[in-house]
Image (cartoon, rainbow, N blue to C red):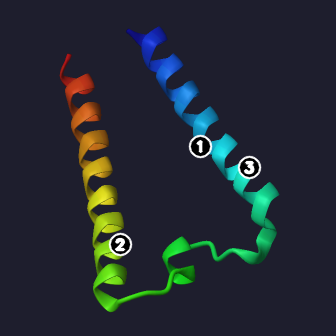
Amino acid sequence: MRRALAVQYTAGAAAYYGISAAGYWAYGSAVSEYLPDQLGGPRWAVVLINAAAFLQSVVSQHVRIVTCSRANLS
């Protein structure tokens, strides 16, 4: 199980760093660190994007905490 977890984290990190490197190569440092700042459009779309980013961070933290607490119980 630890090997599978290590492979999963390695593949995930490779994907995130690969996308980051490709984005920097394509757009350089002209892009804002927080991508929704660069977007234009209706206010409801900006609110929806920010709400989705917030919910993603809440869910990811919850999954992390639950996984750690379950690992400590076994």
The quadrant in which the N terminus is found is top left
- Numbered circle sitting on residue 16: 1
Q: Which residue is mark 3?
A: 22
In the image, residue 53 above or below residue 38: above
Q: Which residue is located at x 80 percent, y 66 percent?
A: 28
Q: The residue tagged with tag 3: helix, strand or loop? A: helix
Q: Amino acid at mark 3?
A: Ala
In the image, residue 36 lies at what x, y percent? 49, 76
Which x, y percent locates residue 64?
31, 41
Disc 3: CA contacts within 10 A as few (<14), some (14-19) or many (>=20): few
- The residue that disc 2 covers is 49
Q: Residue at x 66, y 43 (%)?
A: 17
Position of residue 68 relative to residue 17, above or below, is: above
Give the side of residue 74 with respect to residue 34, left or right. Answer: left
Task: Tell me the quarter of the picture where residue 34 sits.
Answer: bottom right
The amino acid at mark 2 is Ile
Question: Is residue 61 placed above or below 48 in the rendered structure?
Answer: above
| Disc nearest the viewer among 3 and 1 | 3
In the displayed orientation, state which residue is furthest to the front. Answer: 41
Of circles 2 and 1, which is in front?
Answer: 2
Disc 1 crowd rating (10 Å Cα; few below 14, some 14-19, many 20+) is few
